Image: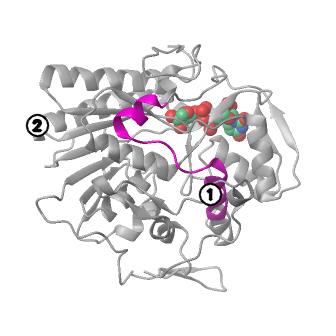
């Protein structure tokens, strides 16, 4: 693999923050250099495609795959990742592949994209299956990371009944599979189970404040029942379970049409359009960079802790501050436009990560600043290639 330099602009150094160049945990073999990961989504050269002057693109068959660790067959897990072609799923797949495991991805490509995992297609350790988790799926595996579900508010509200079906039937199907194969099962739940929280920051012991009939309910309540199902299978059927409650996460491979705040603001700034704030911008969110989340998910899967665990960064911003910070970073001279507030939009959100620290020895390493720079670099590359 070619050794690449860190990006020329390192704003973290301006604030004397540490520049993260390694992620993962050597104790479980998930440690890897940021260079290796960056080569997958921000390659120095495009070895797999050529853009021609007539506006066409020629994709070439890849001759070599990214290097992966050698793992003895006894240590190699067969891992199913539902939603593995999505934003979070594809980064998780990259890391599991790096670790030397065998990975099977299920995705219905509603919000996921084949392009996110194209660098693994044909690899002897990798399989991509087009399948909707609402329908049962039979396979022999030793671990299941169950991610499949639209996660951005516009996507999950687009077809709310389908979102509920995905959470309920999809989770039953995957828990059934875990029960039959005795696979360890990890549910990716969400900070949205806390609703519009009356406790701040949110601890895992907080029961939440969710409107069961509002526009967000299909996702919030869907994930809450997915958690209920997970612990029912644990108590009733001895399924070995893990539950991660994921807080706002961003990074390369977020779909530009995703509709979440990070991708919206970056795309708007790059296009020179006003940044759209819903409400007055005083609502807060705490944003974590994708590689931190992946570290947390793999640690959780590999530790014996079965209660829900918050995974998120504690750096909390108002949406107004966040808009200004993205505008500065992209160096865009665009106005901010206030739009009506979204119904039931949580007014504040910040994780208490004491549990993750104690039981997983995990805490975020990336500053929002470094993560944003890498994400902006990625969106700019997509725009330059005409992909967005
Ligand atoms: O263009 C935009 C988009 C969003 N926003 C605001 O920015 C905040 C964050 O919105 P996002 O859509 O990014 O994400 P939300 O926090 O509402 O939901 C997210 O929560 C946690 C995850 O499980 C999910 O990925 C997602 O549901 C909200 O207050 C929203 O109203 C804007 O002001 N402008």
The front one of 244 and 213 is 244
Q: Is residue 295 above or below residue 201?
A: below
Say which residue label 2 marks.
180
Residue 134 visible? The answer is: no
Q: Is residue 274 above or below residue 163?
A: below
In the visual, does 110 lie left or right of 120?
right
Say which residue label 1 marks.
375
Expressed as whole percent of the image width and height from the top left, the position of residue 276 reads 78, 40
Q: Quadrant of the C terminus?
A: bottom right
Look at 42% across and 49% down and name the residue there: 294
Q: Which residues are magenta?
A: 353-378
Expressed as whole percent of the image width and height from the top left, the position of residue 307 reads 32, 26
Label 1: few (<14), some or many (≥20) within 10 Å?
Answer: many
**Quarter occupied by residue 125:** bottom left
Element class at badge 1: helix
Q: Is residue 248 above or below residue 114?
A: above
Classified by dominant secondary structure, the portion drawn in magenta counts as helix
Expressed as whole percent of the image width and height from the top left, the position of residue 223 reads 41, 26
Look at 35% across and 76% down and name the residue there: 65
Label 2: few (<14), some or many (≥20) within 10 Å?
Answer: some
In the visual, does 172 lie left or right of 282?
left
Q: Quadrant of the N terminus?
A: bottom left
Q: Ligand 1 is located in which of the four quadrants?
A: top right
**Quarter occupied by residue 75:** bottom left
Element class at badge 2: helix
**Which residue lies most toward the front here?**
16
């Amino acid at each position: 693999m070619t050794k690449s330099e860190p990006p020329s602009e390192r704003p973290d150094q301006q604030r004397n923050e540490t520049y993260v160049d390694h992620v993962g945990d050597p104790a479980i073999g998930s440690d890897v250099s940021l260079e290796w990961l960056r080569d997958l989504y921000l390659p120095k050269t495009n070895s797999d495609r050529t853009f021609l002057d007539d506006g066409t693109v020629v994709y070439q068959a890849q001759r070599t795959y990214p290097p992966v660790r050698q793992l003895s067959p006894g240590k190699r897990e067969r891992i199913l990742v539902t939603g593995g072609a999505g934003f979070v799923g594809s980064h998780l797949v990259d890391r599991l592949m790096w670790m030397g495991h065998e990975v099977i991805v299920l995705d219905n490509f509603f919000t996921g994209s084949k392009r996110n995992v194209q660098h693994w297609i044909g690899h002897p350790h990798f399989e991509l299956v087009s399948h909707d988790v609402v329908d049962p799926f039979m396979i022999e595996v030793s671990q299941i990371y169950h991610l499949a579900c639209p996660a951005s508010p516009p996507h999950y509200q687009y077809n709310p009944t389908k979102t509920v079906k995905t959470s309920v039937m999809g989770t039953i199907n995957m828990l059934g599979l875990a029960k039959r194969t005795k696979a360890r099962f990890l549910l990716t739940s969400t900070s949205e189970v806390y609703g519009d929280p009356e406790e701040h920051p949110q601890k895992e012991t907080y029961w939440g404040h969710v409107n069961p009939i509002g526009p967000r309910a299909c996702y919030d309540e869907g994930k809450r029942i997915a958690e209920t199902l997970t612990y029912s299978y644990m108590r009733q059927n001895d399924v070995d379970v893990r539950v991660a409650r994921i807080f706002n996460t961003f990074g390369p491979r977020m779909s530009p049409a995703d509709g979440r705040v990070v991708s919206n603001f970056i795309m708007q700034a790059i296009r020179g359009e006003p940044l759209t704030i819903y409400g007055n911008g005083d609502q807060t969110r705490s944003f974590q960079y994708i590689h931190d989340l992946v570290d947390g998910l793999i640690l959780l899967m590999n530790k014996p802790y079965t209660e829900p665990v918050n995974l998120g960064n504690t750096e909390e911003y108002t949406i107004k501050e966040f808009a200004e910070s993205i505008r500065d970073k992209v160096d865009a001279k665009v106005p901010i436009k206030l739009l009506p507030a979204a119904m039931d939009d949580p007014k504040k959100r910040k994780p208490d990560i004491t549990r993750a620290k104690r039981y997983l020895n995990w805490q975020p390493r990336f500053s929002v600043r470094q993560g944003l720079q890498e994400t902006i670099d990625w969106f700019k590359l997509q725009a330059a290639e005409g992909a967005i």
